[in-house]
Image: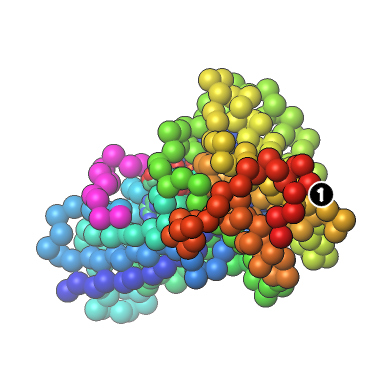
Amino acid sequence: MSKTITCSAPVNIAVIKYWGKRDEELILPTNSSLSCTLSQDQLQTRTSVSFSPTYTKDRLWLNGKEEDVSKSARLRNCLSETRRLRSEYEASLEKKGNSSVAKLSQYFVHAASINNFPTAAGLASSASGYACFVFALCKLYELPISVSDMSRIARTGSGSACRSLFGGFVAWEMGQLKDGSDSQAVQIAPETHWPEIEAIILVVSDAKKATSSTSGMQTTVQTSELLQHRISEVVPRRMKEIIHAIEQKDFKAFAEITMKDSNQFHAVCLDTYPPICYLNDVSKKVIELLTAYNSGPDGIKAAYTFDAGPNAVIYAPKANIKELIQFISFYFPSPRSNPTAYFPDPLKIFQGESWA
Ligand code: ADP
Ligand code: DP6
Ligand code: CO
């Protein structure tokens, strides 16, 4: 007896960033956060999971390369929790008199996962990766549990993964309890609430980051004084403000908070000792260009945000997307789409040269 299940999951890109844990084991954050789940048209993880009596240990291949499951507490956490729930489920079925319950919980699992975008480069691969892994395991084991319960398990793989189980605008409420039972992702608004908002991903570098999110935030918690101000004063206020902006579909307010929070997150990284710099010169140029783009008579027309990596995500209303792509590709022409493109000096934009 064997079975295989294949699932896909989307990434989510935070507009109020999670950065810092108060409990490393349970993955409980030092602040609440809020993200947009992107559609799976562009970025997604696909994961197949299977069990078989012939398997002799749990194994996982990520992008074709085997990871050592025994060395990853996070992979083991997700496997052991879903397996525990399966065995509870099997016991409850037997108690009800079902004598032919398949004892799936006693088999090992193999998993193969592919991200169709750069892994560990600041585009939230751990979010879609663990969301997909946990969702696929729950389906494999046919667990009768809610999406919120799956999200809670995914959180123990990677904090940001708890938000990828929901679509639209999703908050991860930090919670107060020691056991983490009130630290959970909740949908603030579904994707249908504000369909005008689109995301553009600018892949500045597909290289694996030098400092993983997990270790980066550990050092920040230990050393940054600015983090204390951020988690006690700034984030609680911004969470309220951005939820209001989303409810009201107030793009200018949403965009301003998004850009400020990205800036403060990277300031906190620089305030870490030794400092962490996720942004590179191209990322900083993107910030300059977007700042110039937003300084026209119409005010804010697009919002940039950067996770723990150099790659930019830009949120903007559909109506501005064509203009924005023309603008960006003028300053960062793709050799593939336009091999003869002339690369002007981006600084000219500040000297009043037209880019349209
Ligand atoms: P990112 O910015 O891409 O989220 P992180 O440093 O947070 O980077 O996490 C990257 C790590 O997440 C990878 O090294 C790997 O351990 C894990 N990961 C990424 N994708 C997957 C996946 N599809 N399945 C399982 N684990 C994954
Ligand atoms: C900058 O969820 O990747 O993307 O919980 O240690 O796996 P772990 O970290 P992770 O951190 C994400 C940090 C961020 C901001 C965010 O997604 O909220
Ligand atoms: Co991550």
Q: Amino acid at mark 1?
A: Ser
Picture quadrant where residue 207 is located: top left
- Residue 29's quadrant in the figure? top right
Q: Is residue 291 visible?
A: no
Q: Position of residue 163 (x, y in %)?
A: 57, 57
x and y percent of residue 316 in the render? 70, 61
Residue 278 shows in this picture: yes
In this view, 139 is above or below 213: below
Residue located beneath label 1 in the image: 295
180 or 346: nearer the eye?
346
Q: Residue at x 31, y 71 (%)?
A: 5
Query: For numbered disc 1, what is the local secondary structure?
Result: loop
Q: Nearer the viewer, residue 69 or 339?
A: 339
Q: Residues within 10 Å of mark 1 (few under 14, many from 20)?
A: few
Q: Which region of the structure is painted magenta?
A: 63-73
Residue 93 in the image: state x and y as whole percent. Answer: 35, 74
Residue at the left extreme of this rendering: 54
Who's the residue at 62% across and 61% down the image?
325
Position of the C terminus, as image quadrant, is bottom right
Percent x, y for residue 224?
A: 63, 24
Q: Is residue 328 magenta?
A: no
Q: Looking at the image, is 191 positioned above or below residue 180?
A: below
